[in-house]
Image (spheres, coloured by chain):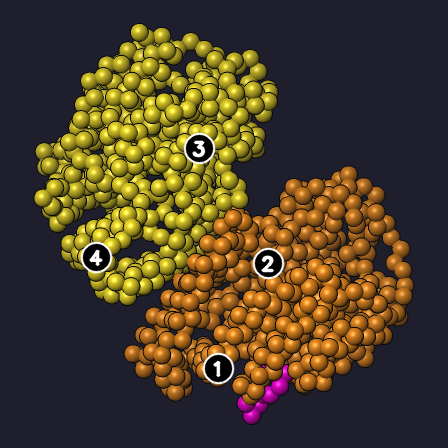
Chain colours: A yellow, B orange
Amino acid sequence: MQKYLDIYFDTNKKLRALQYAMSTIHWDSNTEAPRGCFAQRGKNSAVISELVYKLSTDKVYIDAIKNIYEQREKLDPVMRHEIEKQKCEVDKTSRIPMEEYIKFTELLENARQMYFDAKAKSDYNLFKPYLEQIITYNKNYTVWQQTDKLSGYDVLLDEYEKGFTQKDFDNFFNVLREKLVPFVKKVTSKKLKFNDSWINAYFPADKQKEFSQYLEGVMCFDLNRGLMKESEHPFTLSVDSTNVRFTTHFYENMVASAIFSTIHELGHATYEQQVDPALNDTMSGGGVSMGMHESQSRFYENIVGRSYEFWQRHYPKLVETFPNELKGVTLDDFYKGINLAECSLIRTEADELTYALHIMIRYEIEKRMISGEIGVEELPKEWNKLYKEYLGVDVPNDKMGILQDVHWAGGTIGYFPTYALGSAYASQIYHKMSQDIDTKKEMGSENLKQINLWLKDKIHKYGSTMDPKDILKSATGEAFNPNYYVDYLINKYGKIYDIK
Amino acid sequence: MQKYLDIYFDTNKKLRALQYAMSTIHWDSNTEAPRGCFAQRGKNSAVISELVYKLSTDKVYIDAIKNIYEQREKLDPVMRHEIEKQKCEVDKTSRIPMEEYIKFTELLENARQMYFDAKAKSDYNLFKPYLEQIITYNKNYTVWQQTDKLSGYDVLLDEYEKGFTQKDFDNFFNVLREKLVPFVKKVTSKKLKFNDSWINAYFPADKQKEFSQYLEGVMCFDLNRGLMKESEHPFTLSVDSTNVRFTTHFYENMVASAIFSTIHELGHATYEQQVDPALNDTMSGGGVSMGMHESQSRFYENIVGRSYEFWQRHYPKLVETFPNELKGVTLDDFYKGINLAECSLIRTEADELTYALHIMIRYEIEKRMISGEIGVEELPKEWNKLYKEYLGVDVPNDKMGILQDVHWAGGTIGYFPTYALGSAYASQIYHKMSQDIDTKKEMGSENLKQINLWLKDKIHKYGSTMDPKDILKSATGEAFNPNYYVDYLINKYGKIYDIK
């Protein structure tokens, strides 16, 4: 056993070091590296990726994992969970025919390129043949990875949120379809009256940055173990809990964009900073899943960051930062402005209320795409039909419709549903948190220390030492229940829009 | 042959990729990484260094180098020079007893720590036992690496500036001792009269940054292949010619510091950006030696950047940037202020005229340290004696004397002389350049395009495809000649200080 553990730990040390290098290079590339170096960077990154691939597929390493797995009852629970995950990854990798994998990697390079072309020209037909091959690969993948428990779309869903199947998501989206869709129709048929003059007014970037720094303080982000920078598309990068970075952006004619990008990314970053530091030298550090990560960013962004209590406390600071820009704008005007609900076309610009319906549409399409019920030919029509049905909007072109998201071009099918799941997790967590602490009071406190502490203790500290569904259950005392989400939305928007 | 070349190129590709990763991590650490991540970074960097070490000492790789070396007549001159260098490195490494190397690496970790302690307490005795061991290792090193051509201190000098021996440096410093020392005495006995009110006045950092950006333009620094940032100690980092970064610092009560740090680092950076891009995928890219690199940074900083012609053109821009701060300060006041000569104690703060004398002192001490003529016990006394003799100053304590530089604590003996050599190279290059182009006119041009072009064509483009002495000879038509340096200084300072 010890022999195998030595091999396992030694290889992991190398993998983590190379991962650390790749993360630093990624951060650098996305925040400041000069454009002219990208070709050389590409070459060097490819070599490092190859080193990672060779290390992680080395026979001696794989054998060590298999041998440790055989004797896993001897391990402590954290290490046991880790080795089970690793064994599962090893098995999955071994089931992919190497030549198929190489072909798929090449396909993606071209598909991405063509996707951006097609989007620019708003012409789905350009991208269609690539998407068809991507779907075929994903279908084949579900066959290679089929087990007695998982088949078809379930295989893909499990990749991005372990333990969640079509049955779970069907149940989730059925609740949304039944309760949320009619509610959204009611809300969006009303017009909210308030002073909206500030929404697209000019707010200088340097002052926006100052306010984002203020938000770092409110969220107790530890600058000794992290930093904020700017990039076109905000993102969070965590190397380990001592090294967590995020970016935001400043649009001078859209002040809310920076505020909520900052809070959203700080949500991801807080999760990462609060993982037990003892996990930094293991393969069980970092957030557990896409869905759980998104639940944290959305908890902070929407439940806290778009709450009346939060702005009751912090709006005076915003006014202090922008005394001229916010002259005559009341807290109520601001609160309504950041909680406007509108049926729109673009997912990434959707508001808190309607967001999940965009995901529901993608889920239905993916499900039928993988089952073979609809082919690439029918996708845009189906897309447009569902947008009309659930959101009541007419899709004018492919760019604003089927081509709006890059995910499929990146080869990922089954990823979208985790976005909606994240919001729903957040509401369930909020419900439970409010039984333990006075959440509303804490949202209106000087800082979010108490909320952070609750989340650290119930979720963050565990990193990925358990499956997401087990963390959710241990944190909230029950399995995933989508009703908290719908109840939360109906309650919040019912008040704002005065709907009984 | 092809088999060995394949191994050689393949390993180099990996080494360059890991070097790229280490450079990016280094840049990140020195410019923005949060302090709290340093422990984890240390662990990961150590693993990457170990990977580099294993790759570069792998028997198959070494055998490939040896085999290619045997057949080197078949190679083109660039590749032949590269393999000769690599073979030389391999031979050197093989002559170091592994256990001695490991002991030395450990020694350095402690020595560095203790050096900083000793410096803080200004107590040489704390550092002395470590320095003694460092000297012993270096002495042993000269024995291990002894050849029929090189022995003693020569071995160390050759490490940092290939092809330069004690004979060369003795000749160089003899010229300085004879001609420069008496001249410096004359200059520093005079007092320059001018308006010096601005020298330590307040100049806001953001405006200083704006002027540094202006200097990037003047020096034609390609921002598509490079970037400027801030750090306490300015430095330049070049991954390859497409990715060249430098830092500067802004002291609000010392405006000249940022200006000359920026120009100095831009000198290093220009060298790196102008290396033939075809060398990016070889082991012959990048500047050729410490001396040659320093010659470029000092050429731009001193010969160009402290010239009257340069400021005749750019002083109006400086005044435009600091209209209040420079009110009543004439071009002549500014020119005199940036060319003040003073006998001082600290090398890094020395001016253009006296700088090399600080190096001369270190050279004499190192030479006698390695020959065994003086022991660690006598070093401070000897140091203080030489400072009195050449610079006429009394050293008040160890901190401002023997402990001022970190180099010896880092294990490097034989490195200092390259600093003075760089300045001397620069003058020889300046002399030759002025036969080809109207250098003074170009220094006063809108930008330094023509000067850059000359240096690119004669020096930069070659990267490290030749030895430094061969590059110098091919660029200037003659071997190293220290008289150009002394003549340049006497001419320049004779005019400023009105000395015939």
Q: Are marks 4 and 1 in contact (CB under 8 Å)?
A: no
Residue A346 at x, y percent in the picture? 31, 27
Q: Which residue is mark 4?
A: A71
Residue at the farthest front position: A74
Residue at the farthest bottom position: B148
Q: What residue is rendered at 27% in x and 33% in y?
A: A473
> Is residue B472 at least partly visible in the picture?
no
The residue tagged with tag 1: helix, strand or loop? loop
User: Label 3 is placed on what type of residue?
Assistant: Asn
Q: Are marks 3 and 1 in contact (CB under 8 Å)?
A: no
Of the numbered discs 4 and 3, the one sitting upstream in the chain is 4
The residue tagged with tag 2: helix, strand or loop? loop
Depth check, mark 1 against mark 2: the one in front is 1
Label of residue A80 in the image: none
Residue numbers of the magenta segment: B147-155
Using the rendered image, report if marks 4 and 2 lie on a common chain: no
Residue A419 at x, y percent in the picture? 29, 32
- Chain bearing tag 4 is A
Depth check, mark 4 against mark 3: the one in front is 4
| Mark pair 4, 1: CA separation | 42 Å
| Mark pair 3, 1: CA separation | 54 Å
Q: Which residue is mark 3?
A: A452
Could you tell me which quadrant the C terminus of chain B lies in? bottom right
Depth check, mark 3 against mark 1: the one in front is 3
Q: Are marks 4 and 2 in contact (CB under 8 Å)?
A: no
Q: Are marks 4 and 3 in contact (CB under 8 Å)?
A: no
Q: Is residue B133 left or right of residue B284?
A: right
Q: Which residue is mark 1?
A: B97
Say which of B487 and B394 sits in front.
B394
- Chain bearing tag 1 is B
Q: Which residue is mark 2?
A: B235
Say which of A324 and B101 sits in front.
B101
